[in-house]
Amino acid sequence: MKRNIFLILTVGIFFVLPSIAGAEPLIPRVNLELGTAENPQDVSSTLQVIALLTIVTIVPGILIMTTSFVRIVVVIGFLRNALATQNVPPNQVILGLAMFMTFYIMAPYWSAANEQGIQPYLAGEISQEEAIEKTFEPIREFMFKQTRESDLALFVNLSESERPQTQDDVSTFVLIPAFMISELKTGFQIGFMIYVPFIVIDMIVATTLMSMGMMMLPPVMISMPFKILLFVMIDGWHLLINSIIVSFR
């Protein structure tokens, strides 16, 4: 979790610094006051600030639960295990690649959410409730596309709610876990397809070594270079990334 927060902060700085380059130094003024609220609006504003700070702390979790991040990390993790390369590529590289691929895949949906919900709210054209609803509409559309009906039905039944007639009747709290287990299942299916050719190489190498009487030589030491060579020769990273992105369309 700490690594995810660090990566998100790094990306934020990467995109924010160019926009303020050349401007005068921006030094925020922080003023904290404790006192008695004079009207209900003060209490409401305080609660909104507390809610906003709470949401900021769980932003990494929200990004994981509602985006393509889970599937990408699972698939790349399967690839690393299939190649038997231990910690290569390292976790930081996998998380960084998964994060930027998530930005690429989710960019159209986040852009639609910004145009439909955030910008009209900042312009004062819609209320806060309408802004939240319109902001989540593109994200819900993405999750519905990737969620299996059986997984969605599972959580609808567990919630003991009425059978939804349309997608609008499905609660977001029901949609998110259904989306996550669908992503895990899809990631495992892709991972199985990745494993198959590398298992064949392991079997061929193990059989060859046994037939030569080299039973004390670990097959992994011989098969790993061949698996890496095969992966490089077929331009594996290109095929893998292309397959992951196409799977979301």
Image (tube, rainbow, N blue to C red):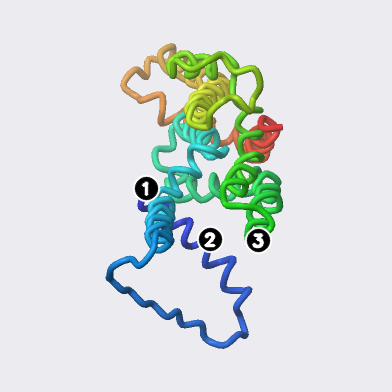
Residue 195 in view here: no
Q: Amino acid at mark 1?
A: Met
In the rendered view, would you say 217 is above or below 76? above
Residue at 53% from the left image edge and 60% from the top image edge: 11
- What residue is shown with label 3? 124
The x, y position of residue 47, in whole percent, is: 38, 55
Which tag is nearer the camera, tag 3 or tag 2? 3
Where is the C terminus found, in terms of image quarters?
top right
Q: Dots 3 and 1: beta carbons under 8 Å?
A: no
Any part of residue 205 in sight = yes
Q: Give x and y (percent) for residue 219.
A: 41, 24
Residue at coordinates 62% horizontally, 74% vertically from top-left?
A: 18
Helix, strand or loop at label 2? It is: helix
Measure how far apart labels 2 and 1 are at the Cα level: 16 Å
**Among the two numbered marks 2 and 1 on one chain, the one whose residue lies closer to the N terminus:** 1
The structure residue drawn at horizontal position 52% and vertical position 36%, both measured from the top left corner, is 76
| The disc label shown at residue 1, or none | 1
Lower position in the chain sequence, tag 3 or tag 2? 2
Number of marks drawn: 3
- The residue tagged 2 is 11
As drawn, the residue found furthest toward the bottom would be 24
Q: Which element is circle 1 on? A: loop
Give the amino acid at mark 2. Val
Residue 113 placed where, x, y %? Answer: 66, 48
* Residue lying at 44% horizontally and 15% vertically, measured from the top left: 160
Q: As shown in the figure, which amino acid type bears the numbered disc 3?
A: Gly
Vertical arrangement, residue 225 with respect to residue 99, above or below: above
Q: How crowded is the residue under tag 3: few (<14 C-alpha within 10 Å), some, or many (20+)?
A: few
Q: Position of residue 32 (x, y in %)?
A: 33, 74
Q: Which mark is residue 239?
A: none
